[in-house]
């Protein structure tokens, strides 16, 4: 006779396996869905005309998203220029300098920052940053620089928490060995701890980039959404995500398919970034 | 022969919270000798080392009473910069901790911190220190490979070479051979015996045979107290305390 407890054990195990695999299934469905909707237009119009095309007029048969690819790239780099030094400095402070009380104060604050909905960031951007840029730097204020600034703040939690984990996982013995050779605290951080945590820090930047490139709501509110390649920091721009969100509500036919094609490009970019980040983290563990 | 005192402690007492780990230790360590500190774990010998290099600063909740000085000058007083002190007092830890850099960079680290940047000078220092640590022949063709690729014994000799590159006056070795094979151990011992003409060396070890082999003076610690301190000959042939004799004969520890 089979023991009931053993049966139950088996049952629980298989239910859990099924749930665990469901996330894989969802991922697969999303892929299949986006590719199924997005690929036909690539085949019909041609990859080159979509990816390198300069003109976006989907109702007239122009599906060029090159300006949006460049714009997405620019805001992501801009976000990184602002978020990376700020985030890394904060992570270094938290892991090397701050006392217990400061950690107790700062860590929940950073987690809260991660939990603020992006529409709130967009709202604050429109109300404060856009007017500031308009009044002090010129242009409409809806610009590359405003978007980069807001995205730079939005990616801080990602950069801080992953860099922090990388920094605290540097063995204490390295710090001691360095100190025993007469290094000051900053010399130890700069010459030993940061180089040792390098791959984790880079992974945090790349995951931050992934977050920035995928951000939609705050971006549509601040970027101005103009259909051209920005030539200055004060020019408005439209990102890949913004394009989808702005037009999906009324798009039909090829126009609709073109938005899915935009999604395919976005998905590939994010997959590549994630792959690079994972590679960085794995290499660190292997060491 | 008259021995000059290099390091002296006066009723040094160290407590972590409510636990006193070093109880009124008074000892004079002589210049250009190897002094062996032995004793079972918890005897306070490593704590004494961490006072001399001020690595004890990194511990929480420590209270230090009494005094410790080098060349007659207190190293516990507020005017001493622990970072400068650690350039005078080199330390080799029990577990070799090469930094995750090349062999050359590991040795150049200390001199670079002192502001030496000239490549030729750094290479000369590296060669010189690696020779003194009996490691040069094994690594001279691969100075730019990662120090983490060396064997445990080689890593420990690298750590010794790295310490020598600081040009310290004192070298503290905290059980440097505890994880090493007999051949690596012998190489370290040979290196230390050569080095004592230039440095004052303190060797902490659980291995009484090692202390007997290479040290000039031996100190036996037990539960935070200095039980016996004399020339190694005396301590090992005619110990004054029965505890010392028992420890040396392996009756406890």
Image (tube, rainbow, N blue to C red):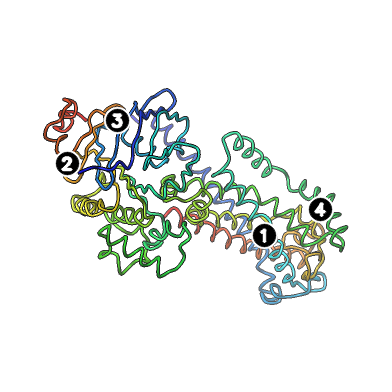
Residue B238: % across, % down:
12, 32
Q: Single out the residue that lies furthest toward the left.
A: B237
Q: Single out the residue that lies furthest toward the top.
A: B18
Query: Which mark is on residue A81?
Result: 1
Label 3 in the same subunit as label 4: no
Q: How crowded is mark 2: few (under 14 residues within 10 Å), some or many (20 or more)?
A: some
For the C terminus of chain B, the quadrant is top left
Precedes in sequence: disc 3 or disc 2: 3
Q: How far apart are marks 4 and 1 (CA)?
A: 17 Å
Label 3 in the same subunit as label 1: no
| Residue where numbered disc 3 is placed | B43
Q: Distance between the residues labelled 4 and 2?
A: 74 Å
Q: Helix or strand or loop: what does disc 4 sit on?
A: helix
| Disc 3 versus disc 2: nearer the observer | 2
Chain of the residue on which disc 4 is drawn:
A
Q: Distance between the residues labelled 2 and 1?
A: 61 Å
Residue A215: % across, % down:
70, 55
Q: In this view, does B64 lie above or below B199?
A: above
Q: Which of B240 and B163 is in front in this view?
A: B240
Residue B95: % across, % down:
32, 46
| Disc 3 versus disc 4: nearer the observer | 3
| Residue where numbered disc 4 is placed | A129
Chain of the residue on which disc 2 is drawn:
B
């Amino acid at each position: 006779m089979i023991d009931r407890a053993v049966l139950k054990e088996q049952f629980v195990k298989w239910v859990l396996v099924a749930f665990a695999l469901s996330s894989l299934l969802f991922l697969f469905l999303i892929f299949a869905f986006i590719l199924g909707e997005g690929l036909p237009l690539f085949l019909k119009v041609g990859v080159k005309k979509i990816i390198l095309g300069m003109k976006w007029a989907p109702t007239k048969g122009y599906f060029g998203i090159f300006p949006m690819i460049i714009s997405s790239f620019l805001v992501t780099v801009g976000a990184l220029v602002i978020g990376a030094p700020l985030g890394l400095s904060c992570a270094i402070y938290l892991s090397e300098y701050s006392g217990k009380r400061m950690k107790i104060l700062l860590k929940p604050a950073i987690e809260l920052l991660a939990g603020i909905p992006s529409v709130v960031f967009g709202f604050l951007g429109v109300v404060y940053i856009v007017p500031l840029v308009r009044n002090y730097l010129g242009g409409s204020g809806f610009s590359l620089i405003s978007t980069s600034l807001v995205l730079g703040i939005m990616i801080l939690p990602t950069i801080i928490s992953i860099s922090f984990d990388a920094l605290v996982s540097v063995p204490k013995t390295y710090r001691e060995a360095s100190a025993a050779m007469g290094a000051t605290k900053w010399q130890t951080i700069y010459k030993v701890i940061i180089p040792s945590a390098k791959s984790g820090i880079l992974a945090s930047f790349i995951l931050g980039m992934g977050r920035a490139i995928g951000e939609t709501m705050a971006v549509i509110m601040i970027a101005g959404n103009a259909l051209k390649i920005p030539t200055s920091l004060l020019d408005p721009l439209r990102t890949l995500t913004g394009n989808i969100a702005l037009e999906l509500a009324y798009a039909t036919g090829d126009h609709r398919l073109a938005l899915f094609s935009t999604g395919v490009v976005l998905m590939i970019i994010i997959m590549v970034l994630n792959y690079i980040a994972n590679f960085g983290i794995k290499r660190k563990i292997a060491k | 022969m008259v021995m000059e005192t290099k390091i002296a402690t006066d009723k040094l007492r160290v407590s972590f919270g409510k636990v006193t780990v070093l109880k009124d230790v008074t000892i004079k360590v002589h210049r250009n000798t190897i002094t062996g500190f032995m004793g079972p774990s918890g005897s306070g010998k490593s704590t004494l080392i961490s006072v001399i290099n001020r690595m004890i600063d990194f511990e929480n909740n420590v209270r230090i009473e009494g005094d410790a000085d080098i060349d007659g000058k207190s190293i516990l007083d507020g005017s001493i910069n622990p970072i400068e002190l650690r350039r005078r007092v080199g330390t080799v830890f029990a577990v070799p901790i090469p930094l995750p850099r090349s062999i050359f960079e590991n040795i150049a680290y200390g001199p670079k911190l002192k502001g030496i940047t000239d490549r030729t000078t750094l290479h000369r220092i590296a060669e010189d220190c690696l020779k003194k640590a009996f490691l040069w022949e094994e690594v001279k063709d691969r100075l730019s490979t990662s120090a983490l690729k060396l064997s445990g014994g080689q890593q420990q000799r690298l750590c010794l070479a790295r310490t020598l590159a600081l040009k310290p006056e004192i070298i503290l070795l905290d059980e440097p051979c505890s994880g090493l094979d007999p051949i690596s151990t012998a190489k370290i011992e040979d290196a230390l015996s050569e080095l004592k003409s230039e440095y004052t060396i303190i060797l902490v070890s659980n291995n009484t045979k090692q202390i007997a082999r290479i040290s000039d003076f031996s100190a036996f610690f037990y539960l935070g107290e200095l039980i016996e301190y004399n020339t190694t000959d005396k301590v090992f042939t005619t110990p004054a305390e029965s505890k010392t004799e028992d420890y040396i004969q392996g009756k406890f520890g």
